[in-house]
Amino acid sequence: MTVSRGREFLSIPGPTNVPDQVLAAMQRPAMDIYAGEMVGITDACLKDLSAIFRTRGRTYIYAANGHGGWEAALANVLSRGDQVLALASGRFALGWGEMAKMLGAEVEVLGGGDWRRAVNPAAVEERLKRDKAHAIKAILVVQIDTASGVVNDIPAIRKAMDAARHPALLMVDAVASLGCMPFDMDGWGIDVAMSGSQKGLMTPPGLAFVAANARARKVHETANLRTLYWDWTFREGEIHYQKYCGTPPEHLLFGLRKALDMLLEEGLDHAIRRHALLAAATRTAVERWAEGQVLAFNIPNAAHRADSVTCILMQGRSPQPLLDYCRDKCGVVLGVGLGELTDKAFRIAHMGHCNAPMVLGTLGAVEMGLKALAIPHGSGGVQAAVEHLGREVEA
Ligand SMILES: Cc1ncc(COP(=O)(O)O)c(C=O)c1O
């Protein structure tokens, strides 16, 4: 017997659920790309994205996924042979660093590729102090590493750079955090920030966003890894067609416009609090389950757990039967473990267009699976999540 028919619950950490209103907004004919409504949509999206990044710098929209956003960020500010420091805290800063290496930078990974801890700002300060010649030109860090479920303290990393009096650019990946957790590009002294459409911003995959402050744009003037497709200067041209270095991805932009309207209507601060609450409810359930000594948080330090995704270790057994059970019997799709955590962990997303029944439904399916598969766990996880939300959501 299964109870999987009904709306599938996509509980993976990206792409996330696309609201029906966003899908509906995409259901329209193509339009002129040189004048009229499309130009207005671009201007409005750029203005709102800058507000969400919280920057007075410039924002660029690319027809690309997150990897494209990474390459856009790197190619605009680096020169061949530049030294780059990637701050490891899971999979994604490593991936960004690998990309920088292939583009022609000299990449050093700090942190030894630790998947269970946030970046240590003191180690960043120590490393930068040793770089007396200021050979390191950029620091790559991910605010939320979607693979490990960690959130890094970006203001503390900025402080560490300042304490070392180091002029490297601070480049931050906000793919799994923008619209989900506080982000303040100018306030935190971030030089280049990037993100994608498919997580907190509730839009189908295919758009990447990069924001650059005045310092980064100055470095850009002499960077020699620039290529036409990613180039900020070209995209700053007057002609609308240049803003995308070609035909705009119109339908994704129609969807993005609607998603930004929805986000701003809810209020960015409210959306961030909603994420915090749903994340806390999820963690409450996981804490109970962990009493059975098989499940455990991948990030032991509670202060370093992200509000958009929770990564749960399965000690001594594969999570695959649980993932299969949730998908096939209940219609809930959970995230698999990535990289070092392949077949060792699973992930529950609480990111983007997501509300209490979606999270409670997902937790309910996991708890059903734990019982059905006789995986040792503390009982009452879902009940604890319900009670947590009941306390926090005012009547
Ligand atoms: C934090 C982070 N950065 C970058 C990426 C890469 O994005 P994409 O898969 O769209 O290329 C991802 C993808 O999940 C991510 O989670």
Image (spheres, rainbow, N blue to C red):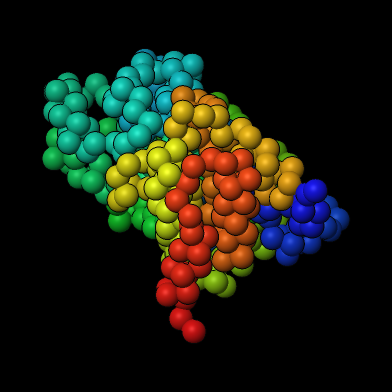
Spot the residue most to the right: 29
In this rendering, position of residue 58 left or right of residue 259: left
Note whether 265 is above or below 321 in the view shown. Answer: below
Question: Does residue 241 appear anywhere in the picture?
Answer: no
> In percent of the image, x 74 and y 43: which residue is there?
328
**Camera-side residue of 361 and 76:** 361
**Camera-side residue of 364 and 38:** 364
Spot the residue most to the bottom: 395
Note whether 122 is above or below 107 in the view shown. Answer: below
Question: Image quarter for residue 123?
Answer: top left
Question: Image quarter for residue 74?
Answer: top left
Q: Position of residue 356 (x, y in %)?
A: 57, 66
Q: How many marks?
A: 0
Note whether 72 is above or below 257 in the view shown. Answer: above
> In percent of the image, x 56 and y 34: which residue is there?
319
**Camera-side residue of 24 and 210:** 24
Question: Image quarter for residue 228?
Answer: top right
Q: Position of residue 44 (x, y in %)?
A: 59, 62
> In percent of the image, x 66 and y 45: which residue is there?
326
Question: Does residue 134 appear anywhere in the picture?
Answer: yes
**Camera-side residue of 120 and 134:** 120
Q: Position of residue 3 (x, y in %)?
A: 77, 53
Q: Position of residue 43 (x, y in %)?
A: 60, 58
> In percent of the image, x 32 and y 19: which residue is there?
108
In this rendering, position of residue 129 left or right of residue 73: left
In this rendering, position of residue 12 left or right of residue 280: right
